[in-house]
Amino acid sequence: ELGSCRRKYLLEYFGEKYESENCGGCDLCLAKKETFDATIITQKILSTIIRTGSRFGANYIIDVLKGRNTKQIRERKHNTLSVYGIVNEFSDGQLKEIIKSLIGAEIIEKAQGEYPILLPANKGKRFLNNKEKIFLPKPKDDDFSDGFKIKDDFEYDEILFDKLRVLRKKIAEKLNIPPFVIFSDVSLREMAYYFPTDEKSFLKITGVGEQKLKNFGNEFLQEINEYARENNLQPKEFSGGRRQDGKKESAKIRTNSETYQITREFLEKKILIADIAKARGLAEGTIVSHIEKMIASGKNLDIEYLKPSAEIFNEIKKSFEKCDAKALTPVYENLGGKYDYEIIRLVRMFLV
């Protein structure tokens, strides 16, 4: 997300130097943004990055600035630093927004790689040495004022998120399924933000239904509870976008492309329909529907391993030919209910 001149960004992206910070013509420069004197908070953020060794991401830096009593901070003795607990005038969301602005202003750099470590940029070092002033866009009063939302920069606990990813990978390897089939990263981020500690609150997490609660709830709740106890963390109240039964409206809105892709991942591993349905907490007929729709849309699926035995296949094939129809009910009735609709639908896929 750009926080400064769009023209400057584009020109420098293509190798041209643009000295001005404000071209006066692009949408970002023309937008009227209220600014504030960010000199002191910038000094605090930079000092915290430096004093903690320039080895941590935004969430950890914010935890130190806010004086949080976490296990990681205690073990590293960062609770003894002079910067520990020196910020109380900004919320976590506002601090995150300020840090993004400082990255856009090239005061702070975000290291490339798996972990988004914050580093003081050369411009930031000069800012500290020369005791310069800096003005930044004023952060919003409340990042969550428009209701519940999840983004890449959602303020989840990065350490717990990593622990949950490790647990997810371990379970996925045991079941021989893709990790995101268990829970998506969005679900894990919500867990690492809200710290659900019981089944009722766990069910409020995006992507968690009764079946996934039954299959994986105990292990994930145990991990969350243990981490929360070690770091004196309390569950956060869920907010926005939820029905009266506690479920989020967004939890039931999973795009077709996403759910089909999950089914496709199982098919690529040559997993049987009954097992896919069990792992996903869906009916077998739903999985068959996914396959039908993917084939109809032109997807190249290798489902030869799902083909019924030659005897069953040929019997159902002859029934389709006899009924001279693609509809299922005439074939089902012609066979006297001998085979389930799902078997008949599978055979039909190979006949199309």
Image (cartoon, rainbow, N blue to C red):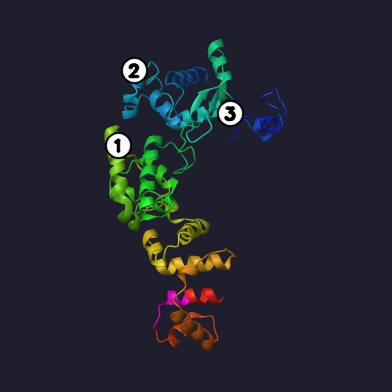
Q: Is 258 or 1 nearer to us in this picture?
A: 258
Image spot of residue 212 (x, y percent): 35, 55
The picture quadrant where one finds residue 339 is bottom left
Tag 3, which secondary structure? helix
Q: Between disc 1 and disc 2, whose residue precedes?
A: 2
Residue shown at the point (67%, 35%) measured from the top left = 27
Which residue position is annotated with label 1?
A: 228
Residue 181 as seen in the image, left or right of residue 26: left
Q: Is residue 144 magenta?
A: no
Which residue position is annotated with label 2?
A: 80
**Disc 2 to disc 3, how far (Cα)?**
31 Å
| Type of amino acid at the residue the image marks with label 3 | Gly
Image spot of residue 217 (x, y percent): 31, 50
Residue shown at the point (43%, 86%) measured from the top left = 335
Could you tell me if residue 152 is visible in this image?
yes
**Disc 3 to disc 1, how far (Cα)?**
34 Å
| Type of amino acid at the residue the image marks with label 1 | Ala
User: Which region shows up in magenta?
Assistant: 338-345
Residue farthest toward the top in the current orientation of the protein: 130
Work out whether 117 lies above or below 183: above
Mostly what secondary structure, the magenta segment?
A: helix
Q: Between disc 2 and disc 3, whose residue precedes?
A: 2
Q: Mark on residue 104?
A: 3
Q: Residues within 10 Å of mark 2 (few under 14, many from 20)?
A: few
Tag 1, which secondary structure? helix
Work out whether 289 lies above or below 214: below
